[in-house]
Structures are given as structure tokens and as C-alpha cells.
Image (tube, rainbow, N blue to C red):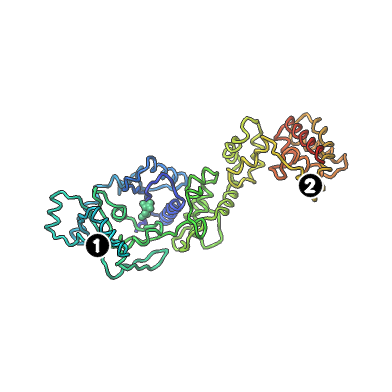
Amino acid sequence: MEVRTRFAPSPTGFMHLGGLRTALYNYLYAKKMGGKFILRIEDTDQERFVEGATEVVYNTLRDCGMVWDEGPDVGGDYGPYVQSDRKDIYLPYARQLVEKGAAYYCFCTKEELDERRAAAEARGEVFKYDKHCLNLTKEEVQAKLDAGLPYVIRLNAPTSGETTYDDVVFGHLSFPNDTLDDMVLIKADGMPTYNFANVIDDHLMGITHVMRGMEYLSSTPKYNLLYEAFGWEIPQYVHLTTVMRDAQHKLSKRDGDAYYSDFIEKGYLKEALINYLALVGWNPGDDREFFTMDELVQAFDIKRLNNAPGIFDMDKLTWFNAEYIRKMPFDEYLKMVTPWFEQVLSGKNLDYRRLAELMQSRTEVFNRVPDMVKFLAEMPEYDIGLYNNKKMKTNPEVAVESLRMVKPVLEGIEDWSENVIHDTVMAAIAESGKKNGAVLWPLRIAISGLNSTPGGAFEIAYLLGKDETLRRLDVSYEKLCNNA
Ligand code: GLU
């Protein structure tokens, strides 16, 4: 039997990382099994409709390389793949259930329901629809329908016994039936509820494996009642644990760590994100950590999905990202880093290629780049305590001497290239009898204002250009003389 999985988002305008991981596992499993990955848009809740939201789904999946075999824009034999385009499909199925006694018409008005809910709550009970309309005779129902009274169609859930099913991740589960409610299948406006449409569509689309968030674990018994009433085969269930920031917290919109777009905007690479996301909730059974999409397909196995919450560790993601950046072809890195340089260095005429060479191995996330390079645009304020360094045998007094020695050397350089700066300064240091560190450490601080920079004194002097290097050197020398 061909494996058919589906990703069935209700488009909100954002792709949550949990959703993206669900899509990923569905994609990986279908590909691994030589089956089909189907995209279905679940937009029956028209009130929540967001303009452009389906495009966000398409773009994100495409961006990440999860190509669907069937879906709204590519078609397929089981379409349409957008629930709102399927709206006429569902009512006849609901009527079939009514005929079988597995569902029934309900004419209770909102006011009546509110009243009964309030009464139940006053008794300290949780309100569950009380099957009031199940007692209507066939004739009474017909009379109300003929009179054009608004109605919904409800599931007739059993009130005793239990419903059980097997889940690939959670094992054998059982739910007491008295917790099930007579959920609405068709709403007063004739539209199906999400709960109903989902089952009908999974069946009609031939879905063999339903892989989705564990928030659906407890609704699944109700879905199974529908399958059973129709006499349809129940798919394999694979419920996925929630992706958490830590043991207590979910990923949250407010902290900017919930959506795919948050991460892309911060400068995480999609390859690193997908690679890490795959490992939040699944493991390959060995100690491999780096996977391309194809390698994930090869390695993926639903038996290795974890049933403990997946902790999405930001530091670990950042580590992955840094590794991916390090391994990028240089020209690709240069192209990606340039706009981040531009944020703070635009108009400065800097050698971005050289700067990128210095930065590639130091870049963990692109949004950290501007802070790391902005000293090239403007000399930061710094404390002369920076000149103290035991290992380099420098302090402010030594630094004054070193800068006094090196300044005319730099002034004398005509060809301001890194090599020439290097060779000239090194020769002068040798001649002066000073230690390299005692000159180069203060020099780098004097022109960068920092004790940690991408590249050393020569690289920075080169990047700044001769005029700016000498200007900064003067300012720092002055500052030292006034304080030392
Ligand atoms: N539309 C549902 C959601 O976005 C999908 C549930 C399912 O996969 O069955 O949560």
C-alpha cells in the first residue's frame, strides 16, 4: 500500500516551528517510504481567514525544500485541496451518519444552550451537550427542517464504555466515552467543522498516516467513531509532542522564537534550522548530527520519534547555524553577509570581501554581524584599562611608547595593502627591540577601541584605510597621554 501523508495547516499568516516540524516529518516519511506528501489547506473557519496566509505556507515549504506531490496549486487526483473549495462535499456525508443513527440534527438555539450551560456551571459541572435533540422523533425533526429552522448536525457519541486506539508515538491509549461530547459536525451555516472535514478529507484523500500535533490526541477517539460509523479504515496515528523552549515554556510569538520567519529574519540559515528541527523530537539512532534533506529522508524512521516534549534549544540551533555558515561557499557567504555589513558600514567604502573573509568563521547568526563590525564605521568609546594585558606585557605606559614608535612607521607607508603594512610594522618592531605583543596589542586597541575584533591590527588598519587609521591612532595616543 502506498504511504500517503498530509500536512493540513489552518493558515494563520505565520508558520510556527511546531507546524514546520510536523510538515517536515510528514514529508520525510512519505519520501522515505516512496509515497506521497499531500498539502491540504484547512480554512473552514472563515472568521479566522487571513489574507495571504496560504502563500506563507507555500513559500515556507518551498523555501525549505518540502515539495508536495499533491496540493492546491499543483493539483492531484483527490482535489480540491482547499477545504473551502470542498464545502459541498461534507453535508451529504453528515446526512449519511444521521441515517445510520451515528449523528443527529440539533435545533437548540444559542440562548437555550447558554442557559443550560449556566445551569450546569452553577451545579459545578462542566457543560456537555445533553443530547436534548436526540429525543426528537423523526416527524418532529422533519417538521422543524420543513419550517426552515436553523440546525447543526451533531455526533451521537456513546456515554459509557471506552474508546481505544494505538498511536505510533504514544502507544495504546484509551479514553472513557463519558468524556466525549456530541461535537458539531455541520454548523448552522452549512459549513463543516474542522473536526468533521478533517476526517472526511483524510479518508477521501486516501491518507494512510495522520501525523500531527499531540493536541489532537484526545479528539481522535471522536474521529474514530466517525470512521467506524462510515465503515472506513482508520489511518495510522502519529501524534507529535509539542516543541518547547524549555521544560515549562512553549515557543512564543512574544519572544520572537515561534515562527519560521522570525528565525530567517534574524539570520539563521534554513538548512541549519531544518537540520536542527528534525532532531527536536526524533533521533537517527546513532550520533550523526548533520543532515541534508536527502540524508534526513534516508535516515528517517517514525519509530524513532520521541514521546517526551521536544526542547528547542536556541544555543544548539545557533551552534548548528555557525557550523553551516562556516561550511558555506565563500561567495555565498559574502552575498548573504553584505546587507548586514551595509546596516552599519554603508558609504564607508570598505573592502567587504576582505572583511567577509575575516568574519565567516566568526559568524554564528547574521544579526550579530552589525555589532561586530560597527567599530569600523565609528570608533567606540573605550577605557584605557583595555591596554592592560599581562600576557602581552602591556599597560597604558607601555602602550604610549609603542604607539609613539609605530605612528611614523604607519605614516611612511605608501602602498596601504595588508602585506606591506604587516611587513613594514614587523620590521620596525624588530628594529625597536620591543616584543610583538607589546606593540600589536595596543595598536589594535588604539584603532578599534576593542580587545576582541575580527582580524588583528594589520587587517583592521588595512580595512580602515590609512587616513582613518592615523586619525584614530592620534586620538588614542592623545587619550593615553592625558591619562597615563
Ligand atoms: N488544521 C489543523 C491545524 O492546523 C491540522 C490538524 C491535523 O493535522 O489533523 O492544527
User: The residue tagged with tag 1: helix, strand or loop?
Assistant: loop
Please give the residue where the numbered disc 2 appears in the rendered image: 388
- Would you identify the image quadrant in which residue 396 lies? top right
Any part of residue 208 in sight: yes
The residue under the point 39% across, 40% down is 52
Q: Nearer the viewer, mark 1 or mark 2?
A: 1
Q: How crowded is mark 2: few (under 14 residues within 10 Å), some or many (20 or more)?
A: some
- Measuring from the top left, give residue 425's x and y in whole percent: 81, 37
Rendered position, 34 above or below 341: below
The amino acid beneath tag 1 is Asp
Say left or right for 259 vs 198: right
The residue under the point 42% across, 43% down is 56
**Residue in front for this viewpoint, 115 or 149:** 115
**Residue in front for this viewpoint, 170 or 343:** 343
- Measuring from the top left, give residue 6's x and y in whole percent: 37, 53
User: What is the count of numbered marks?
Assistant: 2
The residue under the point 78% across, 29% down is 414
Please give the residue where the numbered disc 1 appears in the rendered image: 130
Pointer 1 or 2: first along the chain: 1
Quadrant into which the C terminus falls: top right
- Measuring from the top left, give residue 124's x and y in whole percent: 32, 64
Quadrant into which the N terminus falls: bottom left
Say left or right for 329 vs 193: right
3D distance between C-alphas at marks 1 and 2: 79 Å
